[in-house]
Image: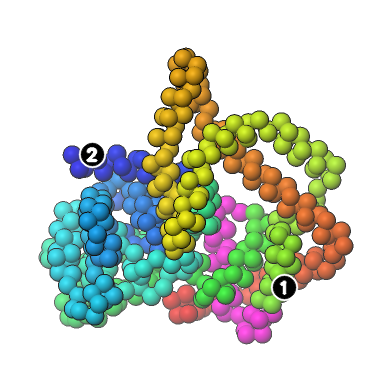
């Protein structure tokens, strides 16, 4: 019964993930079709949605390692136990007392020995970053313990994921899931039999390197901020699909890390100066380029015509989703949790409210009209017109952004475009440099 419940809940989760992150792309999806027992590892920028965005992509029954602090309450203990979670204690969970994870490790061994799948966030905590911090040895120790207890015949693999969210907290933003080649744990047998401790460190290092290849892996938040602006300029100048755009960014970052200090400072200063002007005017690089290419009369007629013709459809979709969109949007502001929980609160609240509110609204329509066909038609139109309302709102925002850019360029065209051209020239110089021999793991 629990297995069928798991399959049903996985389908429901995938539906809601598709709604929240509709533009999701997966590279190396062939690695998802595995038969061996597997430990899935990923970066952890988006708290509870990270394990869902990884394990739900596979067909295997997955368990999840979680912080023991989450099961301290009766409700937390019931919820996380029901949804196949294994608590792991950290030093701060024990208040300095000796950590005791033997039972949890034994449960992991049992699950993996039975051919199961286990999700672990190997850095041990969640932070909104586009890089992986230092990986802890727990994943390697669990993997090596499971293989050793099965006399190295388990065929256990470690499958690395890189979750690249455009903006993890916000609705209908892009998500690129990079999947790396699986690491065969049995390959570490000889080293483990000589020195288990050093082998765990070696496997941990290999996990770290494998995951860094799947992420932009900038050095720090400051570098990541200016790299994002470079990515935006590149994408405006030469749009690419998510996968190729990621590879372009990886090469750019590698070249930045291999550049001399003066060039690095020069391109960083130029990028930040351009970004400062854009932020002051509440515009972006895309709106600057579009404002240069538009035919003003045609642009205004086209957009205003769309806004007028689409207004009734927008109002229909917006009013019918006022509670469904409004409550999840307001809850993070009311609860004031860590921002990394925003998308979790929105998604989980939406999962609960969606069927309830749609049912209640359908019942109200039926009670008012007394006609099933009108009720069914109403329900069928709810979701597509809700999406239309969201797109309408985004189009309005884009229109005003381009309008602001057009007005700003009227008096500041030379200054702003000179800064943009300078950034492009420096990017060209950067692309002509050889790729750095320094790998991300050496940074």
Disc number placed over residue 309 in the picture, else none: none
Q: What span is colored magenta in the figure?
A: 240-267
Reply above or below: 105 against 385. Answer: below
User: In the drawing, does residue 428 fall left or right of residue 159?
Assistant: right
Side (left or right) of 205 relative to 323: left
Q: Up-down: is 348 above or below 120?
A: above
In the picture of the structure, the residue carrying the numbered disc 2 is 4
Q: Between marks 1 and 2, how big is the CA–CA gap?
A: 56 Å
What's the residue at 72%, 37% (across, down)? Answer: 307
Query: Residue 64's spot in the image, x, y percent?
Result: 27, 57
Rendering coords of residue 339 (x, y %): 47, 62
Asked if residue 53 can be seen in this view, the reply is yes
Indicate the colouring scheme: rainbow
Residue 107 versus residue 30 in the image, above or below: below
Mark 1 neighbour density, 10 Å: few (under 14) some (14–19) many (20 or more):
some
Residue named by callout 1:
273
- What residue do we see at 33% from left, 52% from top? 55
Q: Residues within 10 Å of mark 2 (few under 14, many from 20)?
A: few
The answer to which of 198 and 279 lies nearer the viewer is 279
| Type of secondary structure dominating the magenta stretch | helix
């Amino acid at each position: 019964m629990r297995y069928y419940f798991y399959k049903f809940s996985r389908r429901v989760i995938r539906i809601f993930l598709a709604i929240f992150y509709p533009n999701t792309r997966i590279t190396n999806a062939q690695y998802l079709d595995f038969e061996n027992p597997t430990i899935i590892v990923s970066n952890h920028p988006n708290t509870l949605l990270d394990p869902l965005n990884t394990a739900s992509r596979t067909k295997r029954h997955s368990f999840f390692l979680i912080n023991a602090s989450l099961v301290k309450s009766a409700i937390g203990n019931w919820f996380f136990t029901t949804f196949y979670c294994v608590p792991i204690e950290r030093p701060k969970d024990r208040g300095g007392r000796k950590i005791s994870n033997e039972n949890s490790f034994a449960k992991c061994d049992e699950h993996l020995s039975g051919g199961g799948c286990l999700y672990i966030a190997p850095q041990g905590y969640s932070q909104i970053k586009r890089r992986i911090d230092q990986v802890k040895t727990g994943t390697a120790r669990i993997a090596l313990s499971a293989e050793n207890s099965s006399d190295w015949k388990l065929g256990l693999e470690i499958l690395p994921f890189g979750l690249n969210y455009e903006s993890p907290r916000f609705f209908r933003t892009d998500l690129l899931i990079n999947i790396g080649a699986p690491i065969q744990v049995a390959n570490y047998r000889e080293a483990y039999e000589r020195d288990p401790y050093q082998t765990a460190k070696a496997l941990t290092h290999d996990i770290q390197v494998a995951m860094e290849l799947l992420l932009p892996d900038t050095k720090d938040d400051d570098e990541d901020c200016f790299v994002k602006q470079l990515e935006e300029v590149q994408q405006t100048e030469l749009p690419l699909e998510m996968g190729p755009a990621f590879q372009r960014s990886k090469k750019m970052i590698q070249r930045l890390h291999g550049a001399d200090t003066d060039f690095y400072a020069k391109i960083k200063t130029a990028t930040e100066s351009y970004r400062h002007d854009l932020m002051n005017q509440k515009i972006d690089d895309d709106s600057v380029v579009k404002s240069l290419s538009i035919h003003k009369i045609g642009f205004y007629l086209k957009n205003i015509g769309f806004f007028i013709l689409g207004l009734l459809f927008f109002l229909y979709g917006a009013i019918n989703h006022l509670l469904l969109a409004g409550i999840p949007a307001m809850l993070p502001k009311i609860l004031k949790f860590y921002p990394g929980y925003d998308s979790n609160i929105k998604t989980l609240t939406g999962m609960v409210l969606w069927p309830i509110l749609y049912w209640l609204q359908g019942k109200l329509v039926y009670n008012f009209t007394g006609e099933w066909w009108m009720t069914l038609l109403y329900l069928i139109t709810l979701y597509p017109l809700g999406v239309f309302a969201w797109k309408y709102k985004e189009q309005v925002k884009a229109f005003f952004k381009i309008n602001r850019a057009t007005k700003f360029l009227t008096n500041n065209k030379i200054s702003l475009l000179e800064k943009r051209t300078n950034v492009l020239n420096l990017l060209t110089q950067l692309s002509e440099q050889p790729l750095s021999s320094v790998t991300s793991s050496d940074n």
